[in-house]
Image: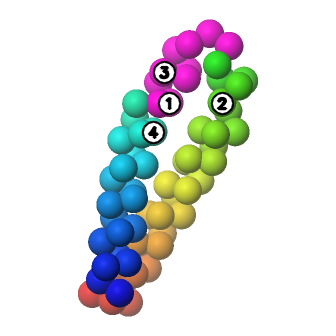
Amino acid sequence: MTIVFQALVLLLVLLTFVLVVAVPVVLATPGEWQRYQRLVYLGAGVWVLLIFAIGLMDVFLV
């Protein structure tokens, strides 16, 4: 289970880097917000789910 926990943390870190770069670019480029709005919301939703999953795993495993 430790490997799963570490994989989730790695996924969270990678997704955070992607969102930190991608969201300002999408918002700054004219007309791109309407095109990538669903993808940004999906990324934010996955990010929140990862936070809860890591939190629950930390409570029950560590």
Residue 6 located left or right of residue 27:
left
- Of mark 2 and mark 4, the one earlier in the sequence is 4
Quadrant location of residue 46? Answer: bottom right
Give the residue type at disc 4: Leu
Mark 4 lies on a secondary structure that is: helix
Mark 3 lies on a secondary structure that is: helix
Give the residue type at disc 1: Val
Badge 2: residue crowd in 10 Å (few <14, some 14–19, many ≥20): some
At horizontal 32% and vertical 60% (from top left) the residue drawn is 10
Badge 1: residue crowd in 10 Å (few <14, some 14–19, many ≥20): some
Marks 3 & 1, CB-CB < 8 Å contact: yes
Q: Give the CA distance from mark 2 to mark 1.
A: 9 Å
Segment colored magenta: 22-31
- Of mark 3 and mark 4, the one earlier in the sequence is 4
Q: Is residue 39 above or below residue 56?
A: above
Q: Is residue 52 above or below residue 27?
A: below
Marks 1 & 4, CB-CB < 8 Å contact: yes
Give the residue number, with chain letter if any, for mark 4.
19
**Place of residue 48 in the rendered image (x, y in percent of width and height, measured from the top left):** 52, 58
Mark 2 lies on a secondary structure that is: helix
